[in-house]
Amino acid sequence: MTTQNHSAGPTRRAFLALSAATAGLASLGMEAWAENRVAIDVDAMSNSDLSTDVLVIGGGMAGLFAAVKAHDAGAATMIVSKGRLGSSGLTPFGKGFFVFDPETETGTIDDFVETVSRSALGTNNPVYTRQVAEHSLDRARELRDWGFFDQTLANRPFMRPIDERGIPLMERVVITHLIKEDGRIAGAAGFRLDAGETVTVRARSVILCTGAGGFKPNGFPVCDLTHDGTVMAYEIGAKVTGKEWNDGHSTRSVNPAACFDSWGDMFERVPATNGVDVHHDLGVDINYRAYVTGNPVEGGPGAPQPTEEIEGGPYVPQEFQHSGPPGGGGAPGKGGAPGKGGAPGGPPPGFSAGSNVGGASAGMAIHKSEGLVPMDARCASNIPGLYAAGDALGSHMAGGIYTQVGSSLAGSAVQGAIAGEAAAEYARSVDAPTIPEARIAGIRNEILAPLRREAGYGPAWVTQTLQGIMIPNFVLYIKKGSMMQAALAYIEELRDHHAPMLRAADMHELRLAHETRNMILSAEMKLRASLMRTESRCSHYRLDYPEPDDENWRAWINIYKGADGSMQLEKQPFGTWPA
């Protein structure tokens, strides 16, 4: 009997180990849920109430051109940015600017559009592909006049046209809510990071230039982007697209979590222009090799090429297959083809020689492939008066794969300019919005709710839990239905139970609380869209559906909020506008 008990139950050593693990989990839970020791007087916080014709949200490349062109079209324009103009989001990282110059290119714009479409397996919207080629040269000339191509930092050249026009600029303001009244956009609301104050801006039209986002991954300059604009727009009824695609940037295995150590040679470059150079890159090829053979993997010009052949993996058209990463040349800053990969003297970002680790941009799709669904060629969403540009617009300019070096920065400039002119035109056609005071009061309560919570979950802990669910290679990149369904169950738990109980002790933590909630909804979108697309195409790869399915899946997936609050998904055939 005694022997049976000992053999059936844990040994003393095993019991002690189990107890220690349980104590650790309990401790982790206590750190997650705690009393909220608020450092500011929430009841004493004021509210700034402002108004404008066109409100531009975001201070990157798209936001710059949106504000300049809206102002030049005669609209009173204001910029609100979470960070500093020219230093927000991925703009400081963007060093390559694609320019289609008819005087130097051997092919035509038609040739360029057709080549991109072949690389993108039809996932691109040719209207927006053509736009970036048609307008890139003009945008580059303006940037050159402002001094953008003369220095590593963008703040001063960006401030030049803003100061010349006297466009009001509010920096370090976190926008958390878009406001819709009478079926159209009416403004936005948020709070200042450096003061105890909420901010309300009434606007006839709004342009989202809020960038893309991720799950705050280590080792890549996307950690302050969390799909804020996409989620805010989704909440008021805007349609969202492209969430199943994945950006395949890796980071260096040496100091992988240190963003500047891995990417400093990109930040320190002076921007440059480049011409047509179409690829099929930054998908999940390297993720598949890591899944099959293990981490880390060798990559980049000069790195040993794989000698072991592996079965299967993402489909790459024969025309765009190559023996090494795109761009050629040596490591960043050490020779190579001028203009390739975003700057002279190096390969595209993420392809330095040596051992690389994946997941550096986890949660982000290919540039311009995710965001608000465009209803037309002028960056309009399905919410009247609400526009988006750059990585906030799911224009599918390049499709679901990285096709043209330098097109991301150029696309943001081109789309920002188009959206600015369209928003100004719309603003002239409508009266100033009326927002009831009770509505503003209700939004302020929602903004400040984490500060008022007596106890709750810390946003850092919830974010770490989200990362543990979503970032693994076998969930986010090399997908299969059973694993995504399991991850979705966890994400739904975070959405329903943890997000409503997020706490914040100060304005910085208030920002984190709102960003964490946005990342949870973005994760749900990625999982649901990836489950729906039962094929593999471009940067979306499923082990259980490893081949492209042209019969059923020549379509984008759009997501919208149903009348009951649930997340709904629909197909939009390639080459069409939404019904």
Image (spheres, rainbow, N blue to C red):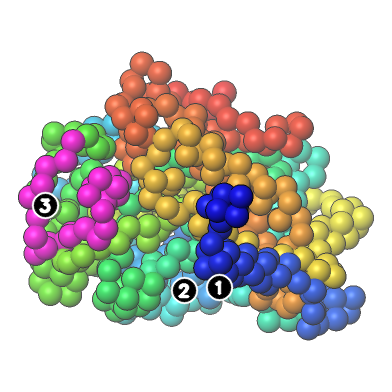
Label 3 residue SS: loop
Give the label, 3 or 1, closer to the camera: 3
**For the residues carrying marks 3 and 2, which lies nearer the camera in this image?**
3
Do callouts 2 and 1 mark residues in contact (Cβ within 8 Å)? yes
> Residue under circle 1?
83
Q: Identity of the amino acid at label 3? A: Pro
Q: Nearer the viewer, residue 327 or 390?
A: 327
Asked if 167 appears above or below 446 in the picture, the reply is: below
Q: Which residue is mark 2?
A: 87
Give the farthest residue toward the front.
1
Report helix, strand or loop for mark 1.
Answer: loop
Q: Residue at x 72, y 47 (%)?
A: 496
Q: Which mark is residue 306?
A: 3
The total of numbered circles placed on residues is 3
Q: Is residue 352 visible?
A: yes
In this view, 225 is above or below 561: below
Q: Please provide the residue range marked out in magenta.
A: 282-311
Q: Residue furthest right?
A: 438
Q: Distance between the Cα atoms at labels 2 and 1?
A: 7 Å
